[in-house]
Amino acid sequence: MRVVILRHGTTELNKQGMIQGSSVDPDLSEEGRAYAEKAAKNFDLVNLMQFMLVL
């Protein structure tokens, strides 16, 4: 079994120390986008989506 844990990407609001909830949906910062792109390269997204649908 393989366990994958990903943290949400960094946003500009994170850098400002602001707490975010369901009412705010900020864009990822440049750093956050870079992390997301790096993570995507390390996963077979088709298999990951199939796993998520089973849950």
Image (cartoon, rainbow, N blue to C red):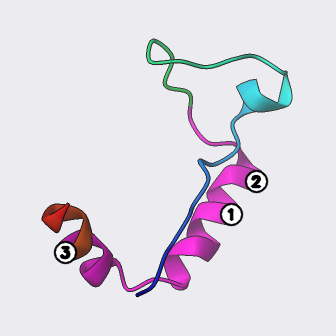
> Which circle's residue, 3 or 2, is located before the other in the chain?
2
Crowding near pointer 1: few (<14 within 10 Å), some, many (20+)?
Answer: some
Q: Quadrant of the C terminus?
A: bottom left
Q: Is residue 47 above or below residue 39?
A: below
State the residue at coordinates (76%, 53%). Answer: 31
Q: CA distance from mark 1 to mark 2?
A: 5 Å
**Quarter-of-image position of residue 46:** bottom left
> Which circle's residue, 3 or 1, is located before the other in the chain?
1
Identified by mark 3, the residue type is Gln
Q: CA distance from mark 3 to mark 2?
A: 28 Å
Indicate left or right for 39 with 55 as reference: right
The answer to whether mark 1 and mark 2 are in CB contact below 8 A is yes
Q: Picture coordinates of residue 22 (x, y %)?
A: 44, 18
User: What residue is pinned by disc 3?
Assistant: 50
State the residue at coordinates (56%, 64%). Answer: 5
User: What residue is pinned by disc 1?
Assistant: 34
Q: CA distance from mark 3 to mark 1?
A: 25 Å
The answer to whether mark 3 and mark 2 are in CB contact below 8 A is no
